[in-house]
Every structure is written in structure tokens, then in C-alpha cells.
Amino acid sequence: MRVLLPLPLADAYDYSVPEGMEVTAGHFVVVPLGRRETLGVVWGEGSGEVAEAKLRDIVGILPALPMAEPLRRFVDWVSAYTLAPPGAVLRMAMSAPSALEAPKTELVYRPVAAASDDTLKMTAARRRVLEQLKEGPALSAAELAHLAGVGTSVIKTMTSAGLLEAVERVVRRRFPQPDGTREGHTLSPDQKVAADSLVEKVKAHAFSATLLDGVPGSGKTEVYFEAIAAALAIGRQALVLLPEIALTAQWLRRFEDRFGAAPAAWHSGLTSLERRETWRGIAEGRVGVVVGARSALFLPFADLGLIVVDEEHDGSFKQDDGVSYNARDMAVVRARLMAAPIVLASATPSLETVANVAAGRYGSQHLPARPGERRLATMAAIDLRREPPDRGRWLAPRVVKAMGEVLAAGEQTLLFLNRRGYAPFTLCRGCGRGLECPQCSAWLVEHRFRRTLVCHHCGYSEPPARSCKHCGAVDQFVACGPGVERLAEEALELFPEARTELFTSDSLMNRNAASEAIDRMEKGEIDILIGTQMAAKGHHFPKLTLVVVVDADLGLNGGDLRAAERTFQLLYQVAGRAGREDRPGRALIQTHMPEHPVMQALVSADRDRFVSAELADRAVAKMPPYGRLASLIISGPDAAAVDNVCAAIARHAPHQTGLSVLGPSPAPLALLRGRHRRRFLLKAPRDVAVQPLLRSWLAQIGLPGSVRLQIDVDPYSFM
Ligand code: ADP
Ligand code: ZN
């Protein structure tokens, strides 16, 4: 038998099956590997490449449900597409190893049928115990004693008297079932059309992909809730993928209000016990709805009938380290392999998805307006060249005035700046040099509240010093540019009476702290919220009427392929936070480039024009979604060794019409964690599959142990 191990090996290994062992594909097994034993999954019949006599035996089969065929095919598919070793992908599908072990058991008690007439042995207490067991399931001694109001010793004596018998039962966490028959909100006519169409697709039990497109607050969530209800009604499971930071207590509460029970959440904050129980519940079909970040895609669903990817354009669906995959794209593959529909929801769909709709590969449903009278925020650009902030400040006078009005009206302001810390870099006035990370080509960012300088790329930190290590000047450091902490300082100076709070991953270290801050904001206990993109996603703040984008140009400076697209999506989302309930909202966008197409599109609220212009540019440049990209990142501690490998890669580069290979060039982050980095970019027409090209190209390259080669198909990061 072929057994795939959850290790980054090139292929699966053959093993023999000992006499008397029944093994089929999908079984989780223990096999010898070198001198140790390891877990693996039976992947199919042996390859026959190794002589029968040389094969080693499978040691044992784990008492877990076998991995279903669609999931095994998915693992193969992801591996073939991303060029990651199949075992590295399998590892993501085995993220709860303890769920594979024999489940814990407990003793439960049930009545012995004939014994109940035995009036001689009956007491009032014993009767109450039997009463509890009359219709319900067998119960543990503790449960039974509690329900009947007796001591556990009564249960024991009843058992020895032959009135009860003890049986062993697997301990299972009970998952309350979301109820698909409960009524949701009365949908608007547009919502109804969209929901009906999705419900039909769920009932069809076949693959389809649909874009659910509508401005923030247009009711997309309510619509896909209907599709989830439909999946539950026919007894199938549903998976909702959310960007990690959108996966909040608020979303879960809303789901619970709609369905009467919470979904199973799958994210990095689960305890190992929770992981194990949830994993099993999903495999055994006892969990109806799972909501999770991208890793939930690899869970062992028993019968998946619907996938929803909310905020489908979000960059966090792309994983860059380890296996480089885009969970949104792979979710489409997973849906196809499970013959299930997938819904991609967004107010600002990715250009990839828009192109797929235009080409007829995906369907689409559009929600044109917010239900009721709610209006989208009005957006205005503030030209910082003509209306500069006061010296040493970052907020333009018009913004300050608007904040004052909002405060006086008892409403809320969000100051959005996608920059953690106090200032993005720190300069010595003595020698003019900035403070750099010793292991990365990046500035150290001052975090004033934590009193430290931090590298946002590798996590290196050092305490702030008074003297410059280059020129020795004392107390000559100046903070350059604003970060959210500096903005909070400014807000506090301008409006000392206002309740001001920071919303960033530094100030809110965990999920609970973030949820509490969101609650305070919802209840109106915060006047001015200052946040990074954590604050931009999916929250509903009823009294938020002013959103200020402090530096709209920030994302455009990097200049990568998606800079404009991403900036537009982010700012549109942020601005969409304003004016949710019955209050009109406005967004003020501070920029040095009010004439830039992104700013123009925001101010004129013309998303579609922006999208078509951007798509046209991409088509001309033959860039995604009209072309394919793959990057190679070569890195190592020794620059010369890295350059040698790059030279070999360049020598063997494929030549083919329409194909171009750019590089090697130093990566923008030329040094990361002490490793020198170079990049190649392969650009190919859309109808060329880049995987076989890459495979045969890179097969010719020998890698010294210290040099790492990372392949990123469909790259999102160009750092
Ligand atoms: P989106 O997902 O497009 O941002 P939501 O589904 O979150 O929009 O809806 C925004 C708000 O409007 C939510 O508070 C939601 O409960 C409410 N809402 C949506 N649809 C309806 C409806 N048909 N009736 C009443 N309230 C609705
Ligand atoms: Zn660093």
C-alpha cells in the first residue's frame, strides 16, 4: 500500500500489509520510518517500485474514520497546483492528531428490563432513578444522580442489585445543532432573488460558484444565511470561511440569533481538546456548520453541501509561508470535488473573481442597495498639499472640525491608519541615519506604549536607547511619520474630553480583548476609535458617522501588481463603516494624490468604473487575471551561495513564446531574518499551465543545504 506521511517528502512511500490486517485507502495508519514510527494516511495501492521483500509492514490502524476520497483528492490537487510536497499539504489536513487516537470512554447506566417490576428492591430514590431513564438515553452516574436528586452510591447499589447495568460509551462533545427551519429577517425583494437562487443551488447538490456582490451593509450575510439554512434542511454541512480578524464574537452571536445555536468555530485560538472534539464532530457529521479561517478548508467534512467565502477579496486568504496557497481559490476546488456550491461574498470582489464572472465561469447575484433607507457614506478627498495639517500634526483642519461636530452630536469617529506603533521609523539628527533591524532590510518601528523598537518582519525588538550607535549623539532621535499610537496622542490633545481607544493587534493582544473593544464601540462607550485594518472589517458600529482615512496613499507606494486594487478595496471597506444605522455617514480621505484613479473612484463612488479601468490595464499588461504569475524566492545566510543558485536558475530558464522570466533581483526585503533573498518572476499567458514548466525547470537545479527555494504560484506578496 502507498502511505502518505505528513512530512515535506517528495512522494508517498510503499508499505506491506501484515497478515490479517484489513487496510483500505484513507485509513490513518502507523508506519515505521527509519528508526521511529510515524502517522500516515493510506493513499492507494502500492507503486510496485520497491521489491516486495524489502517493504516494511504497516504497524497498525488508528481507530479514526478514514480520510474520505474527496479530501484525499483535494490534498493531491493543492499539492499539484502549489508545487508543495503532498505530505506538507496532508499535514494541514491532519491538524488535530489527537482526534485520531482512540476516543475516551465513560460508563453509562441503563435499566435492566425485567428488573423494573421487582417491587421488593424498590425505594423512592431508586424509582426516581429509573424514572430518569425511562425514555432518555443512558446516563453517566454523575448525570443520573444529579437529575434524580440522589447520591452516586444509589446508582452503584442499584447496579449490584441488578436493577441497572453499566455499559461503556465513547465520550463525545455534544454540538447544539443550528436550526435551519428558523425564520430569518424578512428579506428585501433583491435579497429574496439572491437567496432563492443560492437555495436552488444548494438543493441541486452540484458544483457551482456564485459571486454575491453588494455594498457593505446591503445584507449579503442575511442572504448567505438562507443558503446555510437550506443546507442544514437537507442534512448537509456548511463551511463559512472568514478572514481571521473578521471571525469575532459578534459574527458568532449574529449566527446564533439566526439559527438558535452557535456554529463550530475553527481558528488558531482553540485548545487542543476543542480541536479534537470539533474535528471528530465534523468527520462524524455531528457538526452542521463550521466557521473558520483558511485552515478550515482542510477539515474532514462528512457531507459538505455548501461553502461560503466571505470577504473573498481579502488578502489574508493567501498563505505565504509553508504551503503557498490561496484559500479562496482552493475553496472553489474543494467545492468542485465535493459537488457542492460555493458562494463568494464581497462588496469589492477581487479582479480574479470579476473576470471569472465575466467569462461565465462563475454566476453572480447583486444586491444594489441597503435594505430600508440607509445610504452609503459620502466620501470626500482632502488634498493634503492644499490643506496641510498644522506643523507636527497629521490631521487636516477640515478633519479636526468634522471630528468636533461628530463629538458634539454624540456620534463616533474612526481614524484609520494602517500602521502599527508610534512612528514608522526613527532618525538620528546627529548623523541622519535611521534605526534598522540587524537581521532584515527594514526599519525598526517605535512602539511607545510598550517602550520598545520592533521589527514588523521578524519580531526582533530592542529597548529604545538614548545615544546613537553610529555617531554617539545623545537624545537626538526623532520619530518620523505617524503610526496609530502617535495619532492617538494627537486625538487626545485635540479632544481631551473624548473617550479615545486604540484598536490594533498590539493593543488588543487576543480575540477576547478585541471582542470587548468592539462591544464597547457598539454600545457607544468610545468616541474616537483609532485603528489599523483590524478595525476595517465587517463590524457594525451604529453610532459611527465619521471615518477618516489618515494616509490614503500608504498602500499605493509599494507599487506591486495589486496596489491600486487593494487600496481601493481597503478604503472602500473602511469608508463603508460609516453611517450604518439611520444616521448618514461621511468619509474623509487624506491624500497627496486626489487625482489618482483610486481616489477618484472612491469619491465618485464608482466602483465599477474603477474595476473596468483596472481590468483593462491588466489585460494590456497580460497580468492576472489575464496572465499567470509564479515567483521563486531564493534565500540563504550566505549571499554568494544564494547568487550561485540564482545563476543556475537563470541559465536553465525556460524559453517559450509568451513566457518571460524576470530576475534574479534582490527582493524588496533583501535581508529577512538574516537570510539574503533574491526573486524571480515567471509570467505566462493564461492558457499555459505554469506547474509543469516550473517542475522541469527546477528539477535541474541542485540546492546546497543552506539555500532555500520557495515557489509561490499566483503570488500576492512581492516582498
Ligand atoms: P453585509 O453582509 O452586506 O455587510 P449584512 O447582512 O451584515 O450586510 O446586513 C447589514 C445589517 O442590516 C445587519 O445589521 C443586518 O442584520 C441588517 N439586515 C440585513 N438584511 C435585513 C433585512 N432583510 N431586514 C432587516 N435587517 C436586515
Ligand atoms: Zn527584522
Image (cartoon, rainbow, N blue to C red):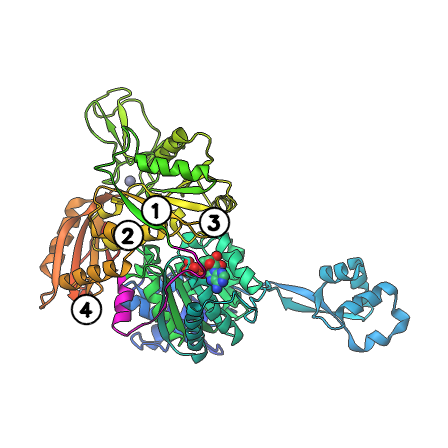
For the residues labelled 2 and 1, the Cα–Cα distance comes to 10 Å
Instruction: Read off the magenta span.
Output: 351-375
**Mark 3 or 2 closer to N-term?**
3
Residue on which disc 3 sits: 542
Disc 3 secondary structure class: loop
Is residue 58 found left or right of 618 in the rendered image? Answer: right
Q: In the rendered structure, which disc, 4 or 3, sits on the residue that comes first in sequence?
A: 3
Nearer to us of marks 4 and 1 is: 1
Quadrant location of residue 85?
A: bottom left
- Dots 4 and 2: beta carbons under 8 Å? no
Q: Which residue is mark 4?
A: 686
Sequence order check, earlier mark of 1 and 3: 3
| Residue occupying image coordinates x 45% and y 72% | 304
* Location of mark 1 (residue): 587
Dot 4 or dot 2, earlier in sequence: 2
| Location of residue 145 with respect to 497 vertically, above or below | below
The reply to whether dot 1 and dot 3 touch (C-beta < 8 Å) is no
- Give the CA separation, mark 3 to mark 2: 22 Å
Where in the figure is residue 383, as x and y percent of width and height? 24, 41
Indicate the amino acid at tag 3.
Answer: Pro
Check disc 1 and give the amino acid type: Ala
30 left or right, relative to 7? right
Q: How many other residues sit within 10 Å of disc 2, few (<14), some (14-19) or many (≥20)?
A: many
Q: Amino acid at mark 2?
A: Leu
- Vertical side of 471 occupied by 286: above or below: below
Residue at 35 percent across and 69 percent down: it is: 332
Check contact, mark 2 vs mark 1: CB within 8 A.
yes
Read off the residue under disc 2. Answer: 602
Residue 581, x across and y down, in percent: 46, 52
Does residue 497 show up?
yes
Between disc 4 and disc 1, whose residue precedes? 1
Disc 3 crowd, CA 10 A, few/some/many (<14, 14-19, 20+): some
